[in-house]
């Protein structure tokens, strides 16, 4: 037993080991576990979409404009008094004042009594409080201090709730906190009038929407609404939360739906969680994961009709679907990483086992070939000896043995050739992802290997889709910078206003929405390679800045005067004629000379047609290794021009693969080829098609037989014939009898009747549609008959138009 056989002998034990490693990975490395759990839940949120919020919650938030217009921060307490007064008049259910009103300030004291009076009169307000949480990861607050809103200090009978939360693999809110024997219920819990069975229950908050989804008003919008007679309908029997949304004053944090979630928005979501019973149920998360982990273990050890890889994928899909349903419908959270990490490692392990088995097969085949050759040599030697013996002594038995031995040798040679042929080197060459066999690309590959080790700037010229980025990556991968970043930038895809920021970065406040410093692509690529695709699309102003980076490696971030230095190898590419652009002064000459140190020109696919067959087969087998392409398809592909180059070819192959697989075929035929790539002259195709139908005397099955003959779909044949009829009918000045004779090309009455019946049906369908739509406007009719144009080749559309217009004129 060799090494490979020994490893494969213990493959079941290997799977057990992999599962254990997966469990240890998530238990020991918490960052990995947290990332998997966080990513999985966010994916669930993407598929589930945002959920609707409870309509009984309304937010009144104080934004930057409110603060500026109302005299700065803190606001006078008279505004809060007015707010509470009006909301009470509007018959709100409860008012949550999320703003923590601090101790008396000299200029506020005059309004304190007014506010207290409104709070007592309303009897619907829940004030906020906070706990000075020294242990931010903990759940117990016994040694901490409880700080109330100022009015509560003077009027203990006022209601209040704490604003505290805990960050611990999510965001939790303690339902109740006990401090020095004082009980303080959570702010949102107090507003919801919720009771909990457990004394210190932690509520895990479910962020399934943005706080902007709640009905919300700014403070000034509310004050402007007061005099509106219908204003009360927005607030009647609602729970209203009041808080600050200005991020310069209120602390914010990021969630899946909000980059900046203010406290008032957070507590609105907590309240919505409580009212709708949508807080995350996390207590049983490990139990569900363990069940599926056991299923995964059993799946990895038992042999099924399907491969272990497929069985593991089925378990993962089942687990994810179950988890999605539990999370989306019942808000039950799972310990996702406990199943996903071992499952992913198992799939990697299955790939490893698959490679080993293939390697073992090759070894066994090689051994088989060697054995066959040895037997062949022995039998040929024996045959030679028998022939010599037969020459000396003529013997019928010897002649029989000689003939039998010749047959055996012939069979052995044939079998030996078959085994050897299946493992001969294919003519396709693959170099750093570049697939080719042509001399033109061989020259490009040789040039890449020569220039890759240097740090000189490279200019790649080639049409769109010819593989410029693949060449750039190959240069990077073969260079001394391969361990560093390769950063690709499509200059044409970014507007001028963003290109400079994207490449050089910006500092906070450099422009609108620049909330923080950002690294540019050059900074990210420091020590590595940056690939600037479509460099010819940049402006002259940007080219000047780029020239400085190439010369000295220096640049400034947008909005900064600080010069930064990077060590980057630049590879630029364009599909334009850069020499001509320089001559016409559309591209800076000095930049051109800096970029054009080393130059690679990639020939278009139409100039290296030798590569089309190997590329087509490569793309097909990339989709499904069992797929083959018929000779007819390859011949048609080679005859095409491929203006979109390799990218266009790949798209066509992908499309053909879909059609072939939909019919469970492992060979791509001409009927899978899009009609626009079917390389037969239009007039020739019409004649070929008509002649084929004429040969079959337009029989009932002639369309199907012709389709099979040319490896085309029935639709292509029938729709082309319909188009040929339309063309002939228009050219014969709408004479049906003449059209039928032209198409049939015979005096045989039986054939003429068949053709007439077929084409009359086309005309009857048009007439029925015109009667149904009962309109004389051609544009309207055409828009309603889109489906009739759908499969009809475009070259016949104008004839179809003329027939419709002809019948409209006759109405």
Image: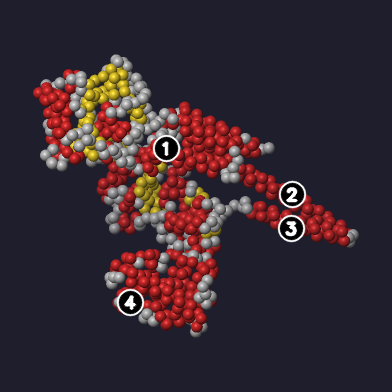
Q: Would you say 778 lies left or right of 644 here?
A: left
Binning the other alpha carbons within 10 Å of mark 1 as few (below 14), some (14 to 19) or many (20 upward) gives: some
**Nearest the camera: 434 or 101?**
101
Q: Residue at x 55, y 40 (%)?
A: 350
Q: Residue at x 28, y 21 (%)?
A: 184
Secondary structure category for the residue under label 4: helix
| Residue tagged 4 | 806
Quadrant in the picture for the N terminus: top right
| Residue tagged 2 | 374
The mark nearer the N terminus, 4 or 1, is 1
In the displayed orientation, state which residue is furthest to the bottom.
747
The mark nearer the N terminus, 3 or 1, is 1
Q: Are marks 4 and 1 in contact (CB under 8 Å)?
A: no
Binning the other alpha carbons within 10 Å of mark 4 as few (below 14), some (14 to 19) or many (20 upward) gives: few
As measured in the structure, the alpha-carbon distance from the residue carrying label 2 to the one carrying label 3 is 14 Å
Quadrant in the picture for the C terminus: bottom left
| Residue tagged 3 | 410
In the image, residue 692 lies at what x, y percent?
51, 74
| Residue tagged 1 | 326
Q: Would you say 386 lies left or right of 494 here?
A: right
The mark nearer the N terminus, 4 or 2, is 2
* Mark closer to the observer (4, 1): 1
């Amino acid at each position: 037993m060799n090494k490979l056989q020994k490893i494969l002998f213990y493959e079941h034990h290997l799977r057990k080991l992999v599962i254990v490693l997966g469990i240890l990975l998530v238990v020991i490395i918490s960052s990995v576990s947290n990332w998997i759990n966080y990513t999985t839940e966010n994916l669930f949120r993407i598929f589930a979409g945002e959920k609707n919020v409870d309509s009984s919650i309304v937010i009144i938030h104080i934004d930057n404009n409110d603060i500026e217009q109302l005299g700065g921060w803190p606001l006078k307490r008279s505004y809060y008094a007015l707010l509470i007064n009006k909301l009470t008049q509007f018959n709100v259910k409860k008012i949550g004042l999320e703003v923590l009103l601090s101790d008396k300030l000299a200029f506020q004291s005059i309004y304190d009594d007014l506010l207290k009076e409104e709070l007592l009169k309303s009897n619907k307000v829940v004030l906020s409080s906070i706990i000075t949480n020294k242990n931010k990861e903990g759940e117990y607050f016994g040694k901490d201090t409880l700080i109330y809103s100022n009015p509560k200090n003077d009027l203990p009978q006022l209601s209040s709730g704490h604003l505290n939360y805990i960050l611990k693999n999510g965001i939790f809110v303690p339902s109740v906190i006990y401090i020095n024997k004082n009980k303080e219920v959570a702010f949102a819990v107090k507003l919801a009038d919720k009771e909990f069975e457990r004394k210190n229950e932690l509520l895990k908050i479910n962020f399934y929407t943005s706080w902007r989804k709640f009905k919300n008003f700014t403070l000034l919008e509310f004050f402007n609404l007061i005099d509106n007679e219908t204003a009360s309908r927005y607030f009647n029997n609602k729970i209203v939360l009041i808080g600050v949304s200005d991020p310069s004053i209120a602390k914010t944090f990021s969630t899946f739906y909000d980059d900046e979630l203010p406290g008032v928005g957070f507590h609105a979501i907590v309240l919505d969680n409580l009212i709708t019973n949508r807080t995350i149920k996390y207590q049983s998360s490990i139990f569900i994961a363990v069940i599926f982990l056991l299923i995964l273990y059993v799946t990895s050890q038992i042999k099924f009709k399907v491969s272990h890889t497929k069985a593991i994928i089925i378990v993962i899909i089942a687990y994810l679907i179950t988890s999605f349903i539990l999370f989306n419908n019942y808000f039950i959270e799972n310990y996702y990483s406990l199943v996903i990490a071992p499952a992913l490692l198992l799939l990697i392990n299955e790939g490893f086992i698959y490679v080993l088995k293939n390697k073992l097969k090759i070894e066994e085949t090689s051994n088989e070939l060697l054995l066959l050759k040895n037997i062949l040599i022995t039998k040929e030697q024996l045959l030679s000896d028998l022939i010599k013996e037969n020459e000396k002594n003529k013997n019928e038995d010897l002649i029989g043995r000689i003939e039998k031995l010749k047959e055996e040798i012939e069979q052995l040679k044939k079998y030996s050739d078959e085994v050897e042929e299946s493992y001969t080197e294919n003519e396709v060459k693959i170099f750093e992802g570049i697939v080719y066999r042509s001399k033109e690309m061989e020259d490009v590959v040789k040039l890449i290997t020569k220039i890759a080790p240097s740090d000189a700037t490279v200019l790649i010229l080639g049409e769109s889709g010819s593989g410029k980025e693949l060449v750039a990556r190959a240069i990077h991968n073969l260079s001394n910078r391969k361990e560093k970043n390769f950063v690709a930038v499509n200059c044409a895809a970014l507007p001028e206003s963003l290109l400079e920021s994207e490449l050089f970065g910006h500092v906070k406040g450099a422009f609108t929405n620049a909330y923080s410093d950002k690294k540019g692509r050059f900074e990210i690529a420091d020590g590595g390679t940056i690939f600037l695709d479509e460099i010819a699309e940049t402006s002259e102003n940007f080219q000047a800045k780029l020239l400085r980076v190439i010369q000295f490696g220096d640049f400034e971030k947008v909005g900064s005067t600080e010069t930064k230095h990077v060590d980057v190898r630049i590879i630029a590419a364009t599909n334009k004629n850069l020499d001509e652009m320089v001559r016409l002064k559309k591209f800076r000459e000095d930049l051109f000379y800096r970029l054009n140190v080393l130059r690679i020109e990639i020939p278009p696919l139409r100039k290296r047609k030798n590569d089309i067959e190997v590329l087509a087969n490569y793309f097909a087998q990339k989709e499904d290794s069992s797929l083959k392409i018929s000779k007819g398809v390859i011949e048609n592909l080679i005859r095409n021009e491929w203006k979109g180059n390799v990218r266009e070819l790949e798209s066509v192959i992908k499309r053909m693969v879909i059609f072939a697989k939909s019919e469970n075929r492992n060979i791509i035929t001409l009927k899978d080829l899009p009609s626009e790539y079917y390389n037969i002259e239009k007039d020739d195709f019409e004649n070929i098609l008509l002649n084929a139908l004429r040969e079959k005397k337009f029989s009932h099955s002639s369309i199907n037989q012709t389709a099979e003959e040319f490896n085309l779909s029935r639709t292509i044949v029938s729709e082309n014939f319909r188009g040929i009829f339309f063309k002939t009918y228009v050219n014969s000045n709408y004479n049906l009898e003449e059209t039928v004779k032209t198409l049939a090309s015979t005096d045989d009455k039986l054939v003429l009747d068949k053709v007439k019946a077929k084409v009359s049906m086309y005309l009857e369908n048009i007439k029925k549609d015109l009667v149904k739509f009962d309109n004389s406007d051609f544009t309207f009719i055409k828009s309603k008959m889109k489906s009739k144009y759908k499969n009809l080749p475009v070259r016949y559309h104008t004839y179809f138009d003329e027939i419709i217009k002809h019948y409209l004129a006759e109405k």
